[in-house]
Amino acid sequence: MRKRQIDTLKIFNHNVQEVKENEEYLVNFDCGGREIAINILLGSGFPNEKPKLIVSPILRHPWVNGTTGEIENAPGILNYTIHSDLGRVVQAVGREFEKHPPRFVNESTPQHHAPPPPAAAAAAAANQHHQQCRNGNVPDYGVDNRNALLSPSHEPDPFGLRNLTTDELSRLNADEDYLEEFVAKLPFLQHQNDELDQLLAGIESLAVDNLARKQTVEERKAKLESLALEFKELGQQWESMNQRYQRKAEDFSPQHIKELLQIAVSTADSKSDDEAQRFLAGQSDVGTFLQNFIESRKLYTMRKAKEERLVQQLTALERAAF
């Protein structure tokens, strides 16, 4: 899963540089015509634990810790789970900086002498809105950003509070429904919702495509099982035929035939000897003796000739190195 997350980083982002394999990567983005770098640190617990993103140089942005440069309040970091895509999280951060280029922390902020809104009401409204945003999982803008919202400057105002009247700020403080409606219309939140809708649409399309292929997969699976069964049966047949072949090969081997001929020769010789012993013992007349003895000796002679011929052939093959 760690490798898959790193692969998504390279898929959804350009200019990905590997600082330390499987642990540290660097991605460059354009921020208002100037290049910034996001350092991605993957701890030993990643992807079960969220990654650490550090922007350099440090930016004045609600998502960024103004002291360390760590991106702490990006929606992808706040809502990170093991199922999040590291590549999309970094891509969303880069797009935010590209679309709404923030200032660098070391840049000087223009001084304004215009009076701020009524101090007590504006400060109370901003502070209450800060608490509501924290409870609603909306990025925490910190003290410096609240001051920026309360002063007419050119610094980013993602919430658009600078253009609100005191009455509208008070209503945000008192009316939760109005606050939820106001937050739902924030540009960066709408951007995240659009990306979420695109992801859901992609997942739905993929699911529909998978369902459409289900029947084909089932048919091919059934065919594969049928072929596997046929292969098993053919294997058993081959094994049986191979055993039969081995037996036949042994039966008809030259060495086995030689042994059988030697046994047949010995049998015919013994039979002729038996006929002679019976004749000498007076158990058979001359005619019977001659007929049986000549027949057995003839059979013996034929078998003996075959045996000798086979022995000569086998000897010749051995000499020829067969």
Image: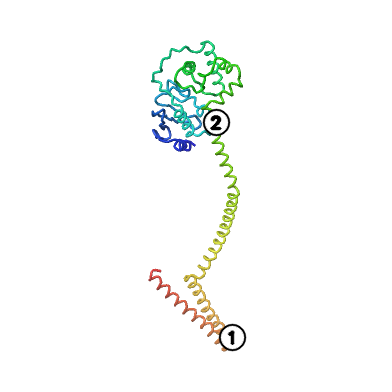
Q: Nearer the viewer, residue 79 or 298?
A: 79
* First of labels 1, 2 by sequence position: 2
Q: Which mark is residue 193?
A: 2
The secondary element bearing badge 1 is classed as: loop
Q: Which residue is mark 1?
A: 284
Give coordinates of residue 141: x percent, y percent: 49, 20
- Would you call the spot at circle 2 few (<14 residues within 10 Å), some (14-19), or many (20 or more)? few
- What residue is at 60 percent from the left and 20 percent from the top? 176
Residue located 52% across and 69% down the image: 251
Q: Secondary structure at mark 2?
A: helix
Quadrant in which the C terminus appears = bottom left
Q: Where residue 100 sits in the image (x, y, percent)?
A: 46, 27
Work out which residue is located at the far bottom of the displayed protein and give it.
287
Q: Compared with residue 248, is residue 196 higher up or lower down, i.e. above or below?
A: above
Residue 203: image location, x then y, percent: 56, 39
Image depth: mark 1 or mark 2 in front: 2
- Res 310 → quadrant: bottom left
Mark 1 to mark 2 CA distance (whole Å): 119 Å
Is residue 63 depicted above or below 204 in this figure? above
Q: Which amino acid lies under the numbered mark 2 shown in the image of this protein?
A: Asn
**Circle 1: residue type:** Ser
